[in-house]
Image: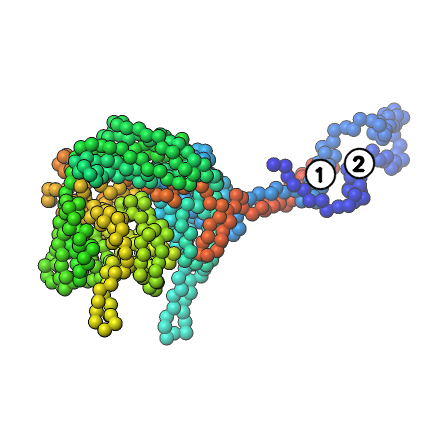
Amino acid sequence: MFPQLVNPFAWWQWLAFAAVPPAIVLLYFLKLKRRPVEVPSTYLWHKSIEDLHVNAVWQRLRRNLLLFLQLLVLFLVLWTVLRPGWQSEKLPGNRFIFLVDNSASMQATDVEPSRLDEAKRQAVELIDQMGSGDVGMVVSFSDVARVEQSFTDNRRQLRRAVEGVRASTRPTSLEEALRVAAGMANPPRFSEKDSADFQVAEPLPATVVVLSDGRFDDPADFSVGNLDIVYRPIGTAEAPNVAITVLSVRRHETSPDQTEAFAQLRNFSSQPVTVTVEWLWNGQPTDANRVEIPAEGSQPAVTKLGVVESGRLGLRAKTGDSLKLDDEAWVAVNRPRRARVLLVGLGNDRLENVLATKAATEIAQVTKELPDYLEKEPYRQQAALGAFDLIIYDRCLPKEPPRANTLFIGTLPPWGDWAAGEAVRAPQVLDVDPAHPLTQWIELGQARFESATPLKIPRGGQALVHSQHGPLLGISPREGFEDAVLGFVLVGMRKGPSGELEKYWGTDWHNLGSFPIFILNMLEYLGGGSRASGEGSYRPGQQVSLESPVPGKPLTVRSPDGQTAQLNEGLAGKYTFSATSELGIYEVSVDGKTVQHFAVNLFDAPESDVRTRPAVTIGRNPVAGQVAGEVSRLEIWRALLLAGLAVLLLEWYIYSRRVSM
């Protein structure tokens, strides 16, 4: 890049300035003022000839170091007056926090070699432009944030931290990373009551640079405070992608001895596409289909497996798009076992009728109790020892969290950060998560609800059913277990016209075909039961609850990349495994004998929709994407002025030596 100059003079001033160099040269041709001196005649003629040569107007200019140094000084002064400089990119401030997105979508290759590599390149470029005294910090984030390098002015350490960020298969959440940044810039205030003296931590403003494709939910409740947010979008806004969003195995409805596999493919682009999918059973191809997917739509793919008891089913889609993580999916088919389920409530005919069907009794053994059972000692022992796989609390509450998965109907767990908003009338379902095992094949668009309380799901949880007022069904992890909550009642009690309590239906969902499907999904996913079908797929980073068929024996889990982990026995033979970062089939064994498989798949629509967002909203403040930082001018006139002074001193030194000799 050529230097940029500033012109401070008019044309006549430049003309006067241009006359200075010739004047310096002419000084070397001035005739000397002669002083009469008596000398021999021969010497006189010799000196006269020399003077003639020296004062000749057109003679060749002799090499003179002092002349060259004087001209160089003049040239440097001229450049100093012009104020030369370069325009460069510079972020505002002197404290920087670089948030590098390493979630699954950042493995897209629409920018080479990948979005993550491009984000790291831009982060290193910004670090190199930090000024003297500036400090920086590096944080990588997906759905969890990790501090790669705390605040330092050592740019080499910052570059090394950025280069050490590794790709992950986890989803994206910016909120935790922003909270880490806010903790550095907005320290909490501390004060002492009943005292005039109080201490307030000094705020340390910082510029937060988010290098991401924007595939995260906007943290609307986040307070920016002293943070200056800069969003650097990575990737292209029109990157197309086709993803496998659902894969499961079920028994055929009319032929229970037969099984079939169902998948759903989704097209995240404005153009229809046709892809070829290949089915694999235990790693061997068994079937192939061509699937036509409309623009911005989805399409199912189905294959028959016949009579199977256990094995591994895989699906590969030949898409040729930029994200490969969602082009493969797996599901584990394990031997069936019946789930142990406890239903506690005042009575719910429709729910109990579904739990009593043949399909439900094949996969679950259900025990029914009244709410006062929660106060009895047998329940306390069973809950503490994990005697049940799933406990359903219908309009009643336990005092302590059980060692089991739970479903709360019309109430909230009295632990964790669950909360609910004000009751709303006649909410309308807008969206159902089709990828989660609890809500797959569920359609609620026709269901009507008398009232509901929109849920506020704890951090780390997930909303599965959305209405215009907020989530109506959510699920959240709890120490190796999961709690699911319905924000409405199926059946309730209220005072009638005569003042007596009477039953009323809070929804007509129980009249729709999706209600028994939801109950069977619940028994399979939360209860752990199966009907010789595929186990529920887990997402990267999700905890998996395991149980050993041999009490007291440790479990060994082998991940898809061949790494093994040994799990020591937990409470009542329960195990928790959380190292689920690899996609694929995990193998669980006891004493070298395989007892179970489970699958980890991406199955995340926001991650598969790899179209980069041009702008995001943080704390209700819109933040437009910036492809470059603020343009700043790097001045170099001070350096030129110092160089001119050094040349002038050198010229003076050489002249002094010549005069003294």
- The reply to whether residue 252 is visible in this rendering is yes
Q: Earlier in the sequence, mark 2 or mark 1?
A: 2
Q: Residue 22 — which label?
A: 2
For the point 26% across and 42% down, the residue is 537
Look at label 1 and name its amino acid: Phe
Query: Which residue carries the number 1 mark?
Result: 75
Residue at 44 percent of width and 56 percent of height = 619
Which quadrant, please, contains the N terminus? top right
Color theme of the render: rainbow
Kindly report the distance in space between the C-alpha atoms of the residues bearing marks 2 and 1: 13 Å
| 85 with respect to 367 (left or right) | right
Left or right of 359, for residue 73: right
x and y percentages locating residue 84 in the rendered image: 65, 42
Q: Which mark is residue 16?
A: none
- Which residue is nearer to you in this view: 406 or 292? 292
Which residue is at the front of the view, 329 or 432?
A: 432
Q: Amino acid at mark 2?
A: Pro
Q: As displayed, is residue 380 above or below residue 287?
A: below
x 20%, y 62%: residue: 396
Q: Residue furthest bottom?
A: 194
Give the left or right position of residue 120, taking residue 541 as reference. Answer: right
Question: Residue 269: x percent and y percent?
Answer: 44, 39
Q: Is residue 253 above or below residue 376?
A: above
In terms of depth relative to the viewer, which is nearer, 543 or 641?
Answer: 543
291 vs 400, nearest the viewer = 291
Secondary structure of the residue carrying numbered label 2: helix
Q: What residue is drawn where x is 23% and y is 49%?
A: 516
Residue 240 visible here: no
Q: Quadrant of the C terminus?
A: top right
Label 2 Cα neighbours within 10 Å, binned few <14 / some 14-19 / many ≥20: few
